[in-house]
Image (cartoon, grey):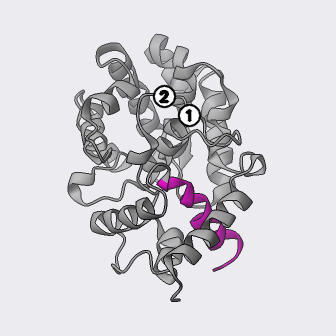
Amino acid sequence: MVISENELKDFLDAKVLQYNTIDFIEPDPISVPHRYTLKEDIEIAGFLASTIAWGNRTMITKNGHRMMDLLGDSPYDFVMSHDENQLERLDGFVHRTFNSEDFKYFIKALNHIYTNKGGLQQIFIDNQTKTSLQPAIHALNETFFEIPHQSRTRKHVADPNKGSVAKRINMCLRWFIRNDNTGVDLGIWKNISPSKLSCPLDVHSGNVARKLGLLQRKQNDGKALLELDTNLRILDPNDPVKYDFALFGLGIFEGF
């Protein structure tokens, strides 16, 4: 598919308007952090829901809400004040390869981050660069596993330094940083620029991006993410990740 840059921008901008609407929320995992108004509740709900965001969208969303129910619908309070007995209520939770032992560790690691590191947002403020949040995702990975953990749980937090596209964390960051004025993305992290966000790259968005000429690299890896980010920032330097809605909608709803 060969079209001019202006035509591509007009096409994708129209798709953003089509899909970046309030109707997007309910069937999507973003509905999980939308349950809350307290900043820390939104952060923890969003981080946990995005962590399990692979597979069937309906099941991801259902299990994300189930996670919040298991946390007594007060995720920040549970993270900060739980005891070992309360962690037992998480027994039996499973989403694909994410099980109750992983869930329990995430609660402990989040407690460590909010108690000793100033919270999730502070890690990204301290480790962002002028153009990227990928080094901050690496710092999150390192911080997250500072306390004793099972090796199996490490696969649930991506590390860009190992070539990962960190799709789920990049999606979570879109939720927290981007303010789209339509009520979809939450925009609670005011002091990190949306211009630094990276597109949540997966099979669907990658295939659409290749058909549109936004991505040449064959495999979905860190180099592909950089290529896609570079091209999306040409189309909109200030809000490049709004095009996630276009790529998602074209891939999932239109079979593009």
- In this orientation, does residue 103 appear? yes
Residue 34 appears left or right of 218: right
Q: For the residue labelled by badge 1, is the local secondary structure a helix, a strand or a loop?
A: loop
Whether residue 230 is situated above or below residue 197 in the rendered picture: below
Please tell me whether the stretch drawn in magenta is mainly helix, strand or loop: helix
- Residue situated furthest right in the rendering: 23
Residue 245 appears left or right of 48: right
**Residue placed most toward the observer, 155 or 141:** 141
Whether residue 32 is in magenta: the answer is: no
Q: Which mark is residue 190?
A: 2
- Percent from the top left, x then y, of residue 14? 68, 65
Residue 120 appears left or right of 188: left
**Residue placed most toward the observer, 179 or 139:** 179
Residue that carries the numbered disc 1 in the rendered image: 187
Q: Are marks 1 and 2 in contact (CB under 8 Å)?
A: yes
Highlighted range, magenta: 240-256
Instruction: Say what amino acid the circle numbered 1 marks.
Output: Gly
